[in-house]
């Protein structure tokens, strides 16, 4: 029994599991083919209390990050990594909550909680990923406005987004120390959303490029202070990386269960695949490593709920969880034989979808650098 969760967390877990079973799983293959999750799902999620769980009232549901973790884990455990609720609820909304004025919070957070306003965050550019000082998107002050020009890529929820937090340079001579955050709304003249990008996995997730052609951004749409964007972004990374680690761990747990079910039914050479020692040893290793990971992540989650999770520990969580997830999914795919390589079989989709988690929120190499610098 996981002691990090209270009774109210377990009650939400039952509700989320039912929502996934009824509102996501029957349609997920169709969304994979379409390359996008419908807006109607966001409204249903809002009506069922799955969005902005950790945002306080009156803007959100008034829970803590344990409630957010429940939503993250249940969707991942069901092998639905292409659902972008976590970016919306656990990245975009917290920026607005922490940095926004009363007017900004009232304008965006309630609609995000209802699923009527879909949030995205745009940092990565074609020539700038983890290297924030290389960001070329510019926001130049002009009276009561900023003129925003540039391009962002790999934006999760980008096609559907009604509100995008954009990291742009307001003082290019300062490099990473001259960045600011802006809230850009759908429909602003000069703001264009590209078509969903073709990816090797997470096909139901609408990931796209965004284009800003001299967009007039009211100064009231800047989040926080000018030239403080770098500090704001780095301060939120621990939660982002913990969320990714929780997704990876729950996804792995779900696929271990699914693989166990499969090898108990599948036969080879007149025997169940489970009856071969190699199969049992492969799954034994997966279960043992996954169990140790879960204990560590629950400790990280408990620390974060107390406001004590540091950047290095969060980096360890993401690094361990995503590397373990990828390695063990590869081992389990092998147990399916040729069926494991079929796109319509769950393990194949899981294997392809998981690969991105070693890149999201900072690559494994960046995590190693963060940890290494602390030694």
Image (cartoon, rainbow, N blue to C red):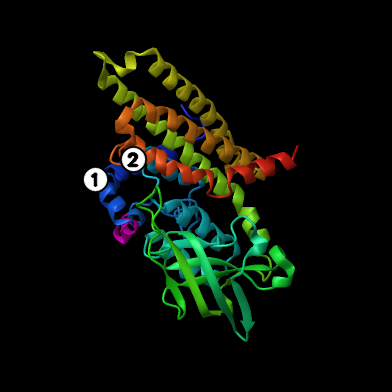
Q: Is residue 242 left or right of residue 48?
A: right
Residue nearest the observer in this picture, 193 or 295? 193
Against 327, residue 207 (above or below) is: below
Q: Position of residue 246 (x, y in %)?
A: 49, 40
Q: Is residue 281 magenta?
A: no
Residue at (50% x, 26% y) in the render: 291
Mark 2, secondary structure of its residue: helix
Q: Is residue 13 visible?
A: no
Against 187, residue 375 (above or below) is: above
Q: Is residue 40 magenta?
A: yes
Mark 1, secondary structure of its residue: loop
Closer to the observer: label 1 or label 2? Answer: 1
Dot 2, crowdedness within 10 Å: few (<14), some or many (≥20)?
some
Q: Is residue 370 left or right of residue 261?
A: right
Residue nearest the observer in this picture, 52 or 187? 187
Task: State which tag comes first along the sequence, 1 or 2.
Answer: 2
Q: Which residues are magenta?
A: 37-44
Against 319, residue 177 (above or below) is: below
Q: Position of residue 242 (x, y in %)?
A: 55, 43
Residue at (48% x, 49% y) in the render: 63
Say whether marks 1 and 2 touch (CB < 8 Å): no
Task: Please identify the quarter of the rendering in which residue 75 is found.
Answer: top left
Q: Position of residue 129 (x, y in %)?
A: 59, 57
Pointer 2: what residue? 17
**Real-space Cα distance between discs 1 and 2?**
13 Å
Magenta segment's dominant SS is helix
Q: Position of residue 190 (x, y in %)?
A: 47, 79
Dot 1, crowdedness within 10 Å: few (<14), some or many (≥20)?
few
Residue nearest the observer in this picture, 342 or 1? 342
Pointer 1: what residue? 26
Task: Please identify the quarter of the rendering in which residue 272 is found.
Answer: top left
């Amino acid at each position: 029994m996981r002691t990090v969760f209270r009774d109210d967390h377990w009650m939400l877990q039952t509700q989320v599991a039912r929502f996934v079973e009824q509102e996501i799983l029957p349609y997920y293959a169709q969304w994979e083919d379409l390359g996008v999750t419908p807006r109607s799902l966001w409204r249903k999620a809002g009506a069922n209390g799955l969005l902005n769980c950790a945002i306080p009232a009156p803007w959100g549901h008034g829970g803590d990050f344990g409630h957010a973790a429940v939503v993250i884990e249940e969707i991942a455990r069901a092998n639905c990594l292409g659902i972008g609720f976590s970016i919306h609820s656990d990245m975009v909304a917290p920026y607005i909550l922490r940095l926004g004025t009363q007017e900004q919070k009232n304008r965006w957070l309630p609609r995000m909680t209802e699923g009527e306003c879909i949030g995205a965050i745009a940092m990565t550019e074609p020539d700038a990923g983890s290297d924030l000082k290389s960001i070329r998107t510019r926001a130049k002050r002009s009276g009561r406005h900023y003129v925003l020009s540039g391009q962002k890529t790999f934006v999760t929820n980008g096609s559907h987004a009604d509100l995008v937090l954009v990291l742009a340079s307001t003082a290019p001579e300062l490099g990473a120390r001259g960045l600011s955050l802006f809230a850009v709304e759908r429909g602003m003249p000069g703001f264009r959303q590209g078509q969903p990008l073709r990816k090797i996995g997470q096909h139901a997730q609408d990931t796209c490029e965004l284009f800003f052609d001299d967009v007039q951004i009211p100064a009231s749409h800047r989040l926080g202070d000018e030239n403080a964007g770098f500090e704001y972004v780095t301060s939120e990374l621990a939660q982002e990386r913990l969320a990714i680690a929780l997704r990876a761990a729950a996804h792995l747990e779900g696929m271990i269960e699914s693989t166990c079910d499969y090898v108990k039914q599948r036969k080879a050479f007149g025997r169940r695949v489970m009856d071969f020692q190699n199969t049992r040893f492969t799954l034994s290793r997966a279960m043992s490593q996954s169990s140790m990971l879960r204990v560590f992540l629950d400790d990280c989650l408990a620390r974060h709920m107390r406001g004590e999770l540091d950047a290095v520990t969060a980096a360890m969580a993401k690094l361990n969880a995503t590397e373990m997830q990828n390695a063990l999914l590869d081992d389990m795919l092998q147990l399916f034989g040729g069926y494991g390589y079929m796109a319509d079989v769950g393990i194949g989709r899981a294997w392809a979808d998981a690969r991105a988690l070693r890149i999201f929120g900072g690559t494994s190499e960046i995590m190693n650098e963060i940890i290494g610098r602390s030694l």
